Amino acid sequence: MKVQKTNLDKLNNKIINCKKCPRLSLYIKEISKNKVKRFKKEKYWGRPLTGFGDPKAELLIIGLAPAAHGGNRTGRMFTGDSSGDWLAKALYENGFSNKSSSQYLDDGYKLQNTYITAALRCAPPKNKPTRGELQNCSCYLKEELSILKNIKIIVCLGKIAFDTCCRLLDIKGAKFYHGNLFSHQSWIILCSYHPSKQNTQTGRLNWDQWAYIFSKSKQILAKSS
Ligand code: SF4
């Protein structure tokens, strides 16, 4: 456990200081200076984001990337934006966190048996990373997967997270669709649409579909313990 924590700390230090993608390094700095009106008075994080959560977690959640005015502002993934609101509520309702909202770094929000990470650690313009940027960043997820030894379920939020996961774990021929669940080596992979506004406000992802992902994860973990 102590070794895991130390390895995660070393990895996170590398991530925070990473500048492998010049376009993204520039973009997150610019966003931090050109703030949106509603966050004008806030100091933006404006650096790459690490994963966060329980180093002994059995549930791993992989998102796409930090949101420009969400994680890139608050300094924590899925914190201070609408995707984070959806995720925090579903996790809390299924016992994977201590509170139902994730707003600021020091808000006391704690994950339980869960670790949250992403395919990309810097917010990309229009949420569209290039293939090269995803390649550059995938080494960090790979390292997390080797450090987080207790993971049993990997929830992939969106096709980019899913494709990244398949590439790293050498999964062939699997299809991405909401609720798809299959085993690969010692993991169960569970696919979900990303809770972005483009999905939640268009009805592509409704609350029941979303809640299913976490109640199913809870059920699987309860059976496996
Ligand atoms: S996206 Fe990843 S690889 Fe690229 S600069 Fe950010 S942290 Fe580094």
Image (cartoon, grey):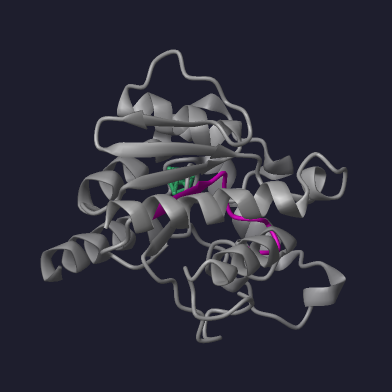
Instruction: Give the quadrant of residue 164.
Output: top left
Position of the C terminus, as image quadrant, is bottom left
Q: Position of residue 219 (x, y in %)?
A: 45, 54
User: Would residue 35 be found to the left or right of residue 27 on screen?
Assistant: right
Numbered circles on residues, count: 0
Image point 82% across, 67% down: which residue? 36
Image point 60% across, 72% down: which residue? 74
Instruction: Give the quadrant of residue 33.
Output: bottom right
Whether 126 is drawn above or below 17: the answer is: above
12 and 55: which one is in front? 55
Position of the N terminus, as image quadrant, is bottom left
Q: Residue furthest left?
A: 3
Based on the picture, tell me whether residue 61 belongs to the magenta stretch: yes
Image point 84% across, 75% down: which residue? 38
190 and 15: which one is in front? 190
The reply to whether residue 164 is in sight is yes
Based on the picture, tell me whether residue 94 belongs to the magenta stretch: no
Whether 33 is drawn above or below 135: the answer is: below
Q: Position of residue 13 (x, y in %)?
A: 31, 63
Image point 54% across, 56% down: which residue? 215
User: Would residue 8 be found to the left or right of residue 15 on screen?
Assistant: left
118 and 170: which one is in front? 170
Q: Position of residue 208 (x, y in %)?
A: 72, 52
Quadrant hosting ligand 1: top left
123 and 152: which one is in front? 152
Q: Residue furthest front?
A: 223
Please provide the residue range marked out in magenta: 59-70
Whether 25 is drawn above or below 71: the answer is: above
Q: Position of residue 161 (x, y in %)?
A: 52, 37
Instruction: Give the quadrant of residue 124.
Output: top right
The reply to whether residue 18 is in sight is no
